[in-house]
Amino acid sequence: MKARHPAPIVKEERNHLLSQLIKGKAPAFLAKHAAIFDTYFHTCFEMSEAGPQISLNHNPYALVALGGYGRCELCVHSDIDLLILFKDQAPDAAEELVREIIYPLWDIGVHVSYATVSLEESLALCKNNIDSLTAVLDARFLTGLSPLYSTLAARVMQELILPDVNKICETLIQKSIERHKKFGDSTYLLEPDLKDGQGGLRDYHTMLWLARIKAGLRTPQDLENSGYLSSSEYGALKDSLSFIWSVRNRLHHLMGRKYDQLRFEFQTQFADMFKFKPRYGQSPVERFLGELHGKMEYVKQHHLMFIEQFGGRKRLFRPKGSPSDKMVRGIVVSNNTLMFKSSAHVVKNPLLLIKIFRESVRLRVPLAAEAKRIIIELEHLAEKFSSDKEAIRDFEFILVSRPITYHVLNEMLNTGILIRIIPEFNRLKNRIQYNQYHIYPVDRHTLHTVRTIKKFATDKEEGNDPLLSDLYSHMKNRKTLLWGALLHDIGKGVESESHSETGALMAKKIMIRAGYDLKCAENVEFLVREHLFLVNIAKRRDLNDEETAIFCARKIKDPARLKMLYLLTVADSISTGAKAWNEWVAMLLRDLFLKVLKILEKKELAGPRADRVMIEKKERLLSLEDSEVGEEERRSYMEIMSQRYFFYMPLSDILSHIRMHKTMKGGDFLWSIKKPAHLDTRTITILGKDRPGFFATLAGIFTMNKIDILDVQTYVWGDGTALDIFTVTPPIDRLRETEKWERVEQQMKDALSSKANLLSYFEKKMVPCRLPKSIPMPEENRVVVDNESSSFFTIIEVFAYDAPGLLFRITKALFEQGLDIRVAKIATHVDQIVDVFYVCDLEGEKIIAQSALDEIQQSVLHVLPMPF
């Protein structure tokens, strides 16, 4: 009786092993998974009908496992990489051998990559392709003629590796650098790549390859046995890899295929799979991601150590000046890195644990891998650094020094010394904020903010905003600013309603404990408490309203504090990520800063100054020469212009609007489009006859054409003319931008000349306003009514997730409540909107009655997107 083919057995055993994995009952899953295929290939070799035809004696062959299969690290949907190695040229009968061995695996859905080559062909592939070489470095004999495999391994080492060790190592390191650029630093990213990102499994593989090439190590255990990792380091590395592999296996199972990026929409499921519970104000998914980031950070750090230890040519760091006569006793420069003379020196003088970082900054030389190991092992000796005057002085030197390529604060965090200086920082380590706006762990974001501020000193040379460079370069209290930056998110480690308020109290205590005077401590407290103040005002309030700048000036009070707060705000936004910082936000913040600074420096607020400005502006408008608009016409136009419009609008724009109004000649609509310098936006000025729903109609047309509104200023003249100034994003297709604007213009003409109810028509054309399923933890929609911040308008703030047509629906709801929108600030934070509207009733008055305010709030809430 013919024996049963082993392929169905493989399928049964894999399914059973996978079911055990999902139940959490499959320890050593990777090795057991590989063993299933080992048995399969052994059985196939014994049952083969093609094998005897090839004849081991005439052209012997061997089956060799490569890559992850060779390492016995076979994840759920990892490829089976197989080498069918012949001593001489592969015979024709090898095709039948492939059909016997490979095809049945394909039939049951297993991905198999194979190569049928001779010994010489295999050597040639390894010589010309680094990926082929590393695959053979991971090779493991399965069955066949074992001496053939041994010959391949020996010749690869003797003929290819040993003659060119440094070049091969340099190639591997360069590939790592290129891979990191492509896939990003997974220890920072909210959607990490578990395999190819920095801190991923490929970093671990690179460590093994470097160790095998440079030191001849064969197994991962040899890293400990040969002294390259301590027992505790090796144990922690195994623990980190085990967690990453567990996540990767479940991701493969969830996707039904090989897939390595842990997408946002899957992460809550993984937190449930791994049974994480809420703790310290963090949700289960935030704790899960924090754990994953911590494990990947550990892999990343050891990968960097191995690059330093086993890399090809050493990078030369030129010490600043001559360090020989200035070095701290117990610290030496060795092979262009900083080292302790011995562990005994550190035990005798624990301050060396901070002084080596100070020397690193002073000399611009990185720490040696062995120095980092000593610091990690002995960091408990730094338990009193948080209040030690000398340790604090050394840390302040590090904090205020110019940034260098080597990120010293990061190394202080990785080795535990930063947490000894600021114990409260421990709860920020690998702490994740689970939304698509904050893409970095809190600790890394904080250090990046500090580094960003210090780089302002050099930004002028690099062509960036000179204002930031000038402010920082002339700042006398940099120490206070940088402490504020370092502590600005310290409150996120504590469960509270406001991390800013909580963090401010914590920051003051930290500064007092560190020995700083009360004034310095209170300034840091202020920066931490108000680090979101300017950006929130810039995005949510009318910057053309003098009351906004006055409100800010009264709160901040001091120009020096304003300058520190502005620099911190910019750096915080930049360090949050590209989605939080753009030209538009930069312009809003700069505009607000300069207006508030002017008030604080001139010590003059409102009242008489506003009256004087109005008189001077009218005189200047009448004195301007303009052939199209005579003096009497200007006087008549001034009679119908609102005081708010005349006060805030530049004279050149006022004249332009008068010309537009004359050109309209009683028509329904006229517009102009301008592209501001240095901004990728468009300013659209629209004149038309004021009518109910005018703003909502325009918003509907922009929405239908997929044009995002960023900001709106609306005015109504005494003759019933509506003047709306929109700041919008340009059309996606820049090549056909003119055509796009022509279509939009025609739609507006048609809409504004129609007497039909276009708002209902627009609403029918738009898709239902619901949240996508990809948002796993939707926050509650909010509508906040503010009747205090403006003397003339009721301010309505809308917080919700973005959805197609949402702005149109909100403006339509406000119109149906009998409200006139005078200012709109539209902000989208990745997937959430914060839209702010300055409104009044149709008589131009604020809404006072509480019942009316409640009805407005409910009507807007009703149109906001709800979950599926």
Image (cartoon, helix red, strand yellow):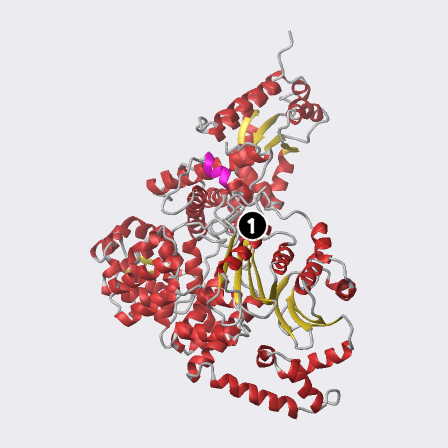
Residue 507 percent location from the top left of the image: 32, 62
Q: Is residue 819 above or below residue 278?
A: below
Classify residue 796 as left or right of residue 715: left
* Secondary element at tag 1: helix
Residue 773 percent location from the top left of the image: 58, 42
Q: Quadrant of the C terminus?
A: top right
Q: Tell me the amino acid under the disc marked 1.
A: Phe
Magenta segment's dominant SS is helix
* Most foreground residue, 672 or 334: 672
**Res. 446 image quadrant:** bottom left
Residue 152 seen anywhere in this rendered image of the structure: no
Q: Is residue 143 above or below residue 548?
A: above
Residue 610 percent location from the top left of the image: 51, 83
Residue that appears at 44% across and 26% down: 25
Q: Is residue 27 above or below residue 281?
A: above
**Residue occupied by mark 1:** 183
* Residue 271 part of the magenta-drawn span: yes
Residue bounds of the magenta highlight:
268-273
Residue that appears at 34% across and 57% down: 502
